[in-house]
Image (cartoon, helix red, strand yellow):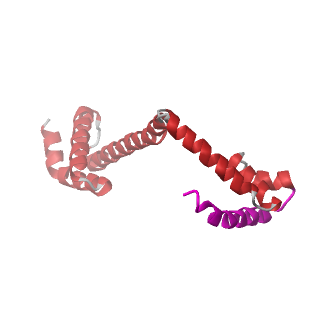
């Protein structure tokens, strides 16, 4: 027990500073330092050579920091996957009035698209209404990808002034 106290008095501050340099947050560094000391205290009787004590303490500290990073990454992953998928599922359905407005807007938009020349209608229709990718449109219409992109861009440019009246 005395040997452990001596080791902590001798190396404790440098272990804490090492942890702080890794995590850059005072309270987290203090928590990880306490966990490091607890783990070291529990495993202290198993250490054979006192000359390797400092290295052993630093290894425990590094492992505690790694464990913390893994735990943080799991939490971040949860927020990315679980919470967003839950919120997407829980989206409220539109009110009947909103559905009517959206349906009316969609039909007016379709009429405006039909006023475009044929070469612009097809790419816009496939891209926005059928959710085809540009590659799929290119393959379906036997056109180069750059041509499909250009036609979509030009169709949008022609539609922009026509859609001002819908806004």
Q: Is 49 contained in the magenta span?
A: no
Q: Which picture quadrant has residue 149?
A: bottom right
Residue 132 at x, y = what percent? Answer: 73, 48
Residue 28 at x, y = what percent? Answer: 25, 47
Left or right, residue 21 beside residue 128:
left
Of residues 152 and 85, the one nearer the viewer is 152
Provide the major secondary structure of the magenta segment: helix
Q: Is 152 contained in the magenta span?
A: yes
Of residues 31 and 145, the one nearer the viewer is 145
The residue range painted magenta reads: 142-167
Q: Is residue 66 visible?
A: yes
The correct choice, above or below, for 107 with respect to 124 in the image is above
Residue 58 at x, y = what percent? Answer: 30, 49
Residue 30 at x, y = what percent? Answer: 20, 47
Please tell me which residue is depicted at 13% across the width and 42% down the height of the picture. 5
Please tell me which residue is depicted at 58% across the width and 56% down the height of the picture. 166
The correct choice, above or below, for 80 with respect to 156 in the image is above
Question: Which quarter of the rendering shows the N terminus?
Answer: top left
The correct choice, above or below, for 38 with respect to 152 in the image is above
Of residues 77 and 24, the one nearer the viewer is 77
Please tell me which residue is depicted at 16% across the width and 41% down the height of the picture. 3
Left or right, residue 145 beside residue 21:
right
Q: Which picture quadrant has residue 74?
A: top left
For the image, the number of numbered tags is 0
Left or right, residue 142 beside residue 167:
right
Left or right, residue 72 beside residue 43:
right
């Amino acid at each position: 027990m005395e040997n452990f106290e001596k080791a902590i008095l001798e190396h404790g501050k440098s272990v804490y500073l090492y942890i702080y340099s890794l995590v850059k947050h005072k309270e987290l560094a203090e928590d990880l330092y306490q966990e490091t000391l607890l783990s070291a205290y529990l495993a202290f009787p198993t250490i054979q050579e006192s000359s390797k004590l400092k290295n052993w303490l630093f290894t425990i500290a590094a492992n505690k920091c790694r464990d913390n990073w893994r735990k943080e990454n799991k939490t971040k992953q949860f927020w990315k996957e679980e919470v967003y998928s839950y919120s997407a599922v829980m989206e409220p359905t539109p009110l009947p009035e909103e559905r009517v407005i959206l349906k009316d807007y969609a039909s007016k938009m379709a009429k405006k698209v039909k006023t475009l020349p044929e070469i612009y209608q097809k790419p816009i229709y496939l891209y926005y209404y059928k959710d085809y990718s540009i590659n799929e449109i290119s393959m379906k219409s036997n056109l180069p990808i750059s041509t499909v992109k250009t036609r979509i861009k030009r169709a949008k440019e022609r539609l922009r002034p026509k859609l001002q009246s819908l806004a």
